[in-house]
Image (tube, grey):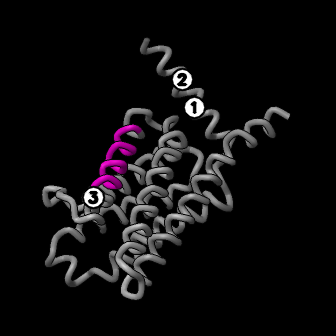
Amino acid sequence: MARQKKEAARNPLARLAGAVYFAYFVTAVGTAILESQMPAVVVKTGNVLAYLLYAIVTLLFYDLFRPVNRALSLVAALVSLMGCTVGTLSAFHLPTYHVNALFFFGTYCLLIGYLILGSKFLPHILGALMMLAGLGWLAFLVPTVAKHTAIGIEVLGVAAEGLLMLWLLTMGVNVEKWDRQERAAAKAKGLEA
């Protein structure tokens, strides 16, 4: 009975994160594919909606990964939200002081990958893939690297984030292990106080 309550509490959060992540993918990829065939206002709306969905995923991930490391989960969320802000400003051609949103999203993927590796409730292979995707997105910022590896970086990034999204959507998290990790984090915090 207690386990069912725990699953009812945690897995919907993980699955909700997966569902919003899926909506982000559909919006971002759909907008990118149809960009040349749509009016500019529709493209901007699609981009803003994609960034809004990613911001929601970010907040859900903060809650999901806080038992692993609350401070690092907060830093990751702030980095991602800065990326969403820069991306939204760029969509409207507003000044971003030459900061590329990929800098934030690459860093975010690295941090989420690290948090997954430190988690006991998700497969570590997802964390390793997210870290590789983060390195790829950061490498994409170097023009000479991007010129020769753009397709590979994009495939790696989409595959890593897509696999994480599908895992959360279909499998959720190991609730028992999530609860244990949360209790251990709370106990450690209690000892520090």
Sequence-wise, the earlier of marks 3 and 2 is 3
Q: Residue at x 75, y 42 (%)?
A: 8
Q: Which mark is residue 186?
A: 2
Mark before the other along the chain sequence, 1 or 3: 3
Quadrant where the C terminus is found in the figure: top left
Q: Quarter of the image holding residue 99?
A: bottom left
Residue displayed at 78% across by 36% down: 5
Judge from the rendering whether residue 122 lies leftward or rightward of residue 40; answer left or right. Answer: right
Which residue occupies the foreground of this view, 185 or 9?
A: 9
Residue at (36, 50) in percent of width and height = 80
Query: CA–CA distance between discs 2 and 1?
Result: 6 Å
Q: Is residue 52 left or right of residue 1?
A: left
Spatial distance from mark 1 to mark 3, Cα to Cα?
36 Å
Q: Is residue 90 left or right of residue 184?
A: left
| Badge 2 vs badge 1, beta-carbon distance below 8 Å | yes
Q: Secondary structure at mark 3?
A: helix
Instruction: From the image, state whether disc 1 or disc 3 is nearer to you.
Output: 3
Amino acid type at mark 1: Glu
Work out whether 150 lies above or below 66. Answer: below
Q: Secondary structure at mark 2?
A: helix
Q: Which mark is residue 89?
A: 3
